[in-house]
Image (tube, grey):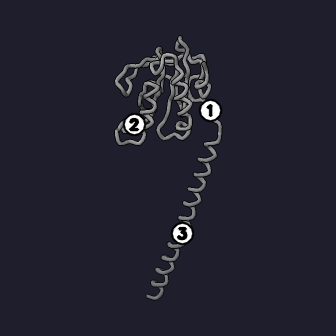
Amino acid sequence: MPFSVAAAILLGLLGLVNLALLLGVIRRLNDHTAVLARLAGEQPRVQSALPPGQRPATFRATTMQGEQVAGQELALVAFLSQDCRRCQERLPAFVEAAKAMPEGRRQVLAVVVAGPEVTHPDNPANSHLTRLSEVAQVVVEQLDGPIASAFQVAGFPSFCRLGSDGIVVANGDAALTAA
């Protein structure tokens, strides 16, 4: 009997030591993840949409305001994600580029890649959608939606400037400064 009690106490202590080590490993993993995220934010981004000289596939979409939009009418297109820090950083530059469009928001499309919950009135992301809708037509779609597929979007943010013939003339941050 005393042997059983000693074995139970030893197993209990071993379990506590194991738990303490596990908590230490989890803490180190969280620290490591934070460092990687910070470093990833400092690295240059690779463009993740159609390169200049290519034409996006034909698409039609309905904006949040119920308007129909097609590719041949556009001069500036942005692909943004609600949970993308870099998208939030580049948003003011996109808004300024959109304001500079000669025909206004009719030529500008902001595609927000998210689920349908983003349009819910209580969602804090609605402030960004409202800001975007002042300068652009806004479409909310999933990552594999028709517009993202037409522009071959693989990352965020992605920007494309289109010529009057519908061919991409600039992409990435260059699309925000091209005339």
Quarter of the rendering containing residue 175: top right
Residue 117 location (% of width, % of height): 36, 39
Tell me the residue that label 2 is attached to: 115
Q: Position of residue 52 (x, y in %)?
A: 60, 19
**SS at badge 2:** loop
- The crowd level at tag 3 (other Cα within 10 Å; few <14, some 14-19, many 20+) is few
Query: Which residue lies at the image location 45% right of the left edge and 84% below the top edge?
Result: 5
Residue on which the image places disc 3: 20
Between disc 1 and disc 3, whose residue precedes?
3
Q: Residue at x 47, y 38 (%)?
A: 82
Give residue 144's quadrant in the image.
Answer: top left
Quarter that holds the N terminus: bottom left
* Residue 70 locus on image (x, y percent): 43, 17
Upstream in sequence: badge 2 or badge 1: 1
Q: Is residue 155 visible?
A: no
Badge 3 element: helix
Secondary element at tag 1: loop
Name the N-terminal-most of marks 3 and 2.
3
* Contact check, label 3 and label 2, Cβ < 8 Å: no
Q: Nearer the viewer, residue 97 or 40?
A: 97
Q: How far apart are labels 3 and 2 at the CA level? A: 39 Å
**Residues at badges 1 and 3 in contact (C-beta under 8 Å)?**
no
Q: Which circle marks residue 46 in the picture?
A: 1
Q: Going 40% across and 36% down the picture, which residue do you hit?
A: 115
Q: CA distance from mark 1 to mark 3?
A: 41 Å
Q: Nearer the viewer, mark 1 or mark 3?
A: 1
Q: Amino acid at mark 3?
A: Ala
Query: Type of residue at label 1?
Result: Val
| Amino acid residing under circle 2 | Gly
Q: Residues within 10 Å of mark 2 (few under 14, many from 20)?
A: few
Q: Is residue 10 visible?
A: yes
